[in-house]
Image (tube, rainbow, N blue to C red):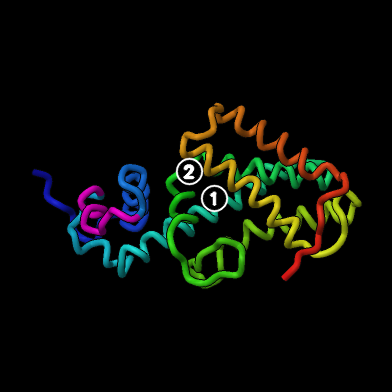
Amino acid sequence: MTRAEPYHHANLRKTLLDAAVALVGEVGPRAFTLREVARRAAVSHNAPYRHFSSKDELLTAVAAEGFYRLTAVMQKRIARCKSPLERLHRSGCGYVDFALRWPQHFVVMFDLPRCPHNGTGGVAGAGGPIVGSNAFNVLLDCVSAAQASGDLPPGDLLPLAWTAWSLVHGISKLAISGNLPLSPRATLQFTLNASRSIFSGKPGISSKVRK
């Protein structure tokens, strides 16, 4: 049998995160234990506690890693877009693209109970702020720019942002669960078409919401 390595294993934190993500892909985020993560990382069962005080803290770190990746993918998708409305559409494609590429992160980010947040779906990162708000702010900036250009109606940003988020989140959930019978490429094209259909500039998209 291979002897587990001690806690000073090189890049232990990253090794544990990778092992946790792989395990989530097999058993889901609720069933795995720190002991099993340690076994897969080939370290002693006490080694994870050098970086994470509990399973929940490890999952939070996985979620934070996911939100950073989500923000980066969304920003990359909109970087070369010329019109504000197209940036909104492409930011949604970035969201779905992230879910397709890192489904285990996506599950941990959104399918587990979290501490109260501000409507962005985020979790507290190592530095304290809600890291999910970075991705949500990309969306808010896209909506705001589309309002300024006249492509979307003026008013409160949030109802429009929630509409966009709900659309791409639903597509993502269907796609990674195998309930959307499309290839990844076709899924992204479907996302783009759906976004363009909803945010076409036609009457019916309200920027007001009743509290």
Mark 1 residue type? Arg
Residue closer to the observer: 171 or 134: 171
Quadrant occupied by the C terminus: bottom right
Q: Which residue is mark 1?
A: 69
Q: Which residue lies at the image location 83% right of the left edge and 54% below the top edge?
A: 145
Camera sees residue 11:
no
- Secondary structure state at the residue bearing disc 2: loop
Residue closer to the observer: 73 or 86: 86
**Residue 22's x, y, as percent?**
34, 44
Q: Is residue 146 left or right of residue 51?
A: right
Q: Which residue lies at the image location 81% right of the left edge and 51% below the top edge?
A: 205
Q: Is residue 174 left or right of residue 60?
A: right
Q: Residues within 10 Å of mark 2 (few under 14, many from 20)?
A: some
Confirm or deny contact between disc 1 and disc 2 (CB under 8 A).
yes
Q: Residue furthest left?
A: 1
In the image, residue 32 above or below residue 76: below
Number of numbered callouts drawn: 2
- Secondary structure state at the residue bearing disc 1: helix
Residue closer to the observer: 180 or 131: 180
**Residue 84's x, y, as percent?**
82, 47
Q: Which residue lies at the image location 73% right of the left edge and 62% below the top edge?
A: 158
**Residue 109's x, y, as percent?**
48, 56
Mark found first going from the N terminus, 1 or 2: 1
In the image, residue 168 above or below residue 64: above
Q: Which residue is mark 2?
A: 102
Q: Is 127 contained in the magenta span?
A: no
Q: Is 38 contained in the magenta span?
A: yes
**Res. 97 image quadrant:** top right
Mark 2 residue type? Trp
Q: Residue furthest right?
A: 150
Q: Which residue lies at the image location 60% right of the left edge and 32% below the top edge?
A: 187
Q: Which residues are magenta?
A: 30-40
